[in-house]
Amino acid sequence: MAYTLINTRPASRVASDTSPTALAAAQRVLVDSHNRRVSYLRLSVTDRCDLRCTYCMPERMTFLPRKDVLSFEELDELVTAFASFGVDKLRITGGEPLVRKDIMELMARFSRHLGNGLNELTMTTNGTLLSKYAGDLSAIGVRRINVSLDTLKRDLFEKIARRDMLDDVLRGIDAAIAVGIKVKINAVALHNTNEQEIPDLIRFAHERGADITLIETMPMGEAETDRVEDFLSLNTVRKELEQQFTLTDLDFKTGGPARYVKVAETGGRLGFITPLTHNFCESCNRVRLTCTGRLYTCLGREDGADLREALRSDPSGIKLREAILGAIERKPKGHDFDAARLATPASPRNMSTTGG
Ligand code: SAM
Ligand code: SF4
């Protein structure tokens, strides 16, 4: 296998034994065959959720049997392996991460890598349980958090999320801000649904000192909605917004695929994530790991590795390191999302399985 080696131990050691095992032991950072450094892991700790957003999953979603889900010890071992490969940013996601039992115990385990491998531990949440956990998250070193919020209207929230929980989310956002966590709002832009409300969402976020990012719907997994009907191009949204806001492109990057603008009227930042109208793969620095230990090296493709098998079959950890290196080596150049083919999922996995 032709692993890309940079920043490794002395070359002489590598040169003397070039077996995959020796290379796996020597490698310190993950670089794929397209010369992209992988430094960001998004880890889904559960596929379960207390909402049922229509674009994400069906009402009667079949969740994984609990026995298939990795234990805290196993998740911790995986995070430790990635941190030892120079992955310095860890985002916890799901499903809804805060519904996993004893989630704060798990977060506390991960937090011991902060300053010791990890530079950032963060989370993407729907916010329904955030008022309960904001203080604990801040205490273990979480400084930034993404909260998904597609509407400020209670009836529309219930229509999109199929649960009447807008007030819980708003309380959660306030609680996070109150303990000093920097909040970013994520909103999926939906044609004829929250389309007219986007300016209000921008004002809502910016009044609270929060950034906001708009996301195009992605054809992931089966949903009960019509993805073609729901799809709203962010090019169109931007043109509409320019009728009432002055938008200036920014160089600002958070390590993610969003392209940011400054909104002069509110003084805040607005991001656009456009997987369908603009491909963001050339600078991709991330991989995703499901709660069953399946590593996906591209959001829209099946490539990856079964890390649970590697983890459970070899206590020495060598198989795990080899499996990670092999998967990174095979990381695809880009996803295959295509606005013309929205009706059929580009990936059979729901976003809640892979971790958005
Ligand atoms: N439950 C948490 C939440 O909603 O923030 C974390 C997991 S959720 C899968 C992560 C993000 O993916 C959310 O912002 C959600 O809106 C987004 N998402 C889910 N399905 C999507 C789809 N088909 N297209 C685009 N974004 C999607
Ligand atoms: Fe749950 Fe997040 Fe999917 Fe909504 S987007 S159903 S909150 S996992």
Image (tube, grey):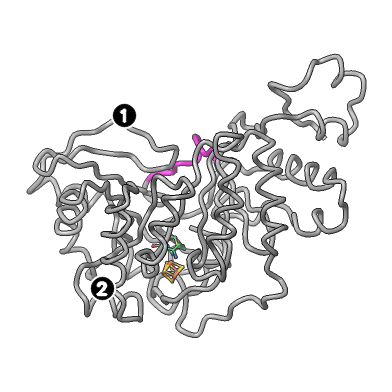
Name the image quarter holding residue 255. top left
Find residue 352 and name its label. none
Q: Of helix, strand and loop, which one carries label 1?
A: loop
Question: At which x and y percent is residue 196?
Answer: 16, 64
Label 2: which secondary element: helix
Spatial CA span between label 2 and label 1: 35 Å
Quickly name the residue at label 2: 167
Label 1 CA crowd tier, 10 Å (few <14, some 14–19, many 20+) = few
Name the magenta segment's main secondary structure: loop
- Quadrant of the rendering where the N terminus is positioned: top right
Q: Nearer the viewer, residue 197 or 314?
A: 314
The type of residue carrying mark 2 is: Asp
Q: CB under 8 Å between callouts 2 and 1?
A: no
For image coordinates 81% across by 15% down, the residue present is 11
**Horizontal arrangement in the rendering, residue 325 relative to residue 261 (left or right):** right
Q: Residues within 10 Å of mark 2 (few under 14, many from 20)?
A: some
* Magenta-highlighted residues: 278-285
Q: Which of 77 and 273 is in front in this view?
A: 77
Judge whether 221 appears above or below 63 on screen. Answer: above
Q: Position of residue 238 (x, y in %)?
A: 21, 48
Which residue is at 71% across, 29% downward? 28
Q: Where is residue 333 in the image (x, y as percent from the top left)?
A: 59, 40
Q: Which amino acid type corresponds to the residue marked 1 in the rendered image?
A: Asp
Q: Which residue is drawn at 46% across and 53% down?
A: 123
- Nearer the observer: mark 2 or 1; the answer is 2
Mark seen at residue 251: 1
Which residue does the image show at 67% across and 30% down from the upper left? 29
Between 232 and 117, the residue placed more toward the observer is 117
Compared to residue 64, the image places residue 256 above or below, namely: above
- Asked which quadrant contains residue 339, the reply is bottom left
**Ligand 2, what quadrant?**
bottom left
Up/down of 9 relative to 329, above or below: above
